[in-house]
Amino acid sequence: MIKFGTGGWRAIIGDDFVCSNIRVVAASILEFAKEQNKTGKPIVIGYDRRFLSESAAKWVAEVLAKGGIEVWFLNRSAPTPLIMHTVKDKNLHFGVEITASHNPARYNGIKLFVDEGRDAPLEVTHRIEEIISGITETEFCDFDEAVEQGKIVYLRNPFNKFLDDIINLLDMNALRERGLRVLFDAMHGSGSYPLQVILHTARCTIDTINLDKDAYFGGQMPAPSEKTLAALSDMVVKGEYDFGIAMDGDGDRLGIVDKYGEYINANEILCMLYYYLVKYKGWKGAVVRNLATTHMLDKIAESFGEKCYEVPVGFKYISSKIDEVDAVLGGESSGGLTVRGHIHGKDSVYAAALFSEMVSVIGKSPSEIFAELEGLYGTYKMIEDNLSFEPERKAEIDKTIMVDKLLPDFGVKIAKVNYEDGCKVYFEDDSFVICRFSGTEPLLRIFAESSDGVAAKKYIEDFKKFLNI
C-alpha cells in the first residue's frame, strides 16, 4: 500500500519504491489535477542525489506528459526548498520532489507541493491515496521524445530567482564586513550549490566537505546530528573556523557546529534566530513550533509580549499557522524552519544564511549567544529516543496510549495531557514528554524536555518500561 506521511510518500528502494509504484503515484497526481481542473499550468519536478532519484523523476515526468500536462524538469539535482519556491514564484498548482529527505539511504520517496508551494495537506494526500487504490494500469511516454516534442521542458538557471530572493532578505553588508570563515558539510546532499553561492557573494570564506554524490551518504544517516557531525566538529576546531554548517539530503534540515566544536541543535537554532529577528532586527510577531519542540520559545515570545503557538508534527501545520497569525518564524526540533516572507516550507539554505548574518551582527559565537539566552530564560534540555518495534505491536501500543489513554507513573505532577498528535504529557514545572509514531519511518519517537537532562531521560525510560520496548 502507498501511504503518505508527514513528509510525503517514502518507501524502501527495490521493495515498494519501484518503477511501477512510482508511476502509479504520478498517475494519481495526474488524475487529481484533472479533478481539480488544474492541468493548465506546468508541474515542476526536481530530485535529490539519492539512488534512483533522477530515474524516478523521469518516470513521473513521462506519466504527466502523456496525460497532457507540461513538465518543467530540472537538469541537475536540487534541494526541496527550490521546488517549493518555484511553485510559489511561478504561481504553479503543483510541484514534485523525488527525495526521502533525512531517511536512511535505503529509502526514497516523493514529496508533493500544491498552490503557493505548500506541502500537500491531508485532504489532498488522502484523496490521492484513494485514487491510487483504483489505478490498475498507467500510461506513459518516452522521456526523450517528450523533450523533443516540448512536452517536457528543461528549466534553465532554475536557481537564479531562489538565490536572489534569499539575498534580498539578508543583511549582506553585515556579512561582508564580518568576513566569516565557515566549513560546510554538504552531507552528499543537494543543498550545497545555493548556500555556497550566497556565502561567496557575501564574501565569506567557505570550505566544503562531503560535496560529492554518494548514494550511501558516506555510510551515515543523511541528517545533521551530534553523531553524524562529529568529523565536522573536529575539523571546525582544527581549522579555526567561525562555525560549521550541515544540511540533510534534500536541504531542508539544518545543523550547526560552534567554533569550540559544540553541536548546536535545532531547538537552540530556533531560539537564537527568533530572538535575533525580534531583538536585533525589530520584527514583531509570534512564533510557531510543533508539539515536540522546545518550550524555551514560549518564554522568549512571552518576554517580548508575543505568543508561541503549538501545532501537530508536520510542517504543513507550521506554515499554515504562520500565515494565520503572521508569525515571525516557525520550526521543529528535527531541524526544519522557515521565516515570514519566504517560502511556506523548510529551507536550510535561507536558515543557514540567516544564521550567518546573526553571528556577523551580534559578534559572538553561537554557543555564547545561546548561553546568553539561558541566562535570560533558563535551561531547557531535550532528549530524544527513536524506538523500533515489531510491526504487529503497533496496534497494541496505539491502543494503550491513544485509546485506553494509559500513562506511566512519572512520579511528578501532571498539568495536562494532549492527544492531538500522539500523547504529550505536560508537567507542572513546564517540562514535558511526548510519545508518537513517526510519520516517515516505522519508529516510535519519544521526546522529553526538562531543566536538566537526567529528568528528561527518566521520562523516556518511564515510557519505554511502561510499553515494554
Image (cartoon, grey):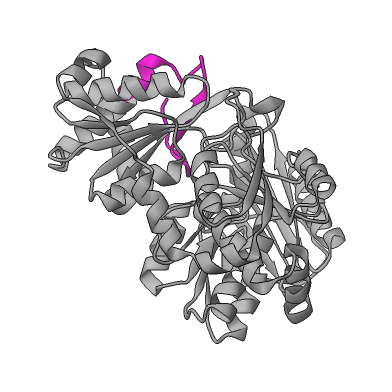
Looking at the picture, how far across and down is residue 128, in whole percent? 30, 35
Who's the residue at 71% across and 73% down the image?
A: 430
Looking at the rendered image, the quarter that the C terminus falls into is top right
Residue 429 lies in the magenta stretch = no
The image shows residue 260 at horizontal and vertical percentages of 83, 56
Residue 307 can be seen in this image:
yes
Examine the rendered structure and indicate whether residue 420 appears above or below residue 83. Answer: below
Q: Nearer the viewer, residue 454 or 68?
A: 68
Up/down of 156 relative to 449, above or below:
above
- Residue 17: within the magenta? yes
**Closest to the observer, 28 or 350:** 350
Quadrant (top left, top right, bottom left, bottom right) of the N terminus: top left
Q: Identify which residue is drawn at 60% across, 23% down.
A: 214
**In this orientation, which residue lies closer to the viewer: 414 or 258?**
258
Q: Residue at x 55, y 87 (%)?
A: 305
Could one spot residue 271 in this view of the protein?
no
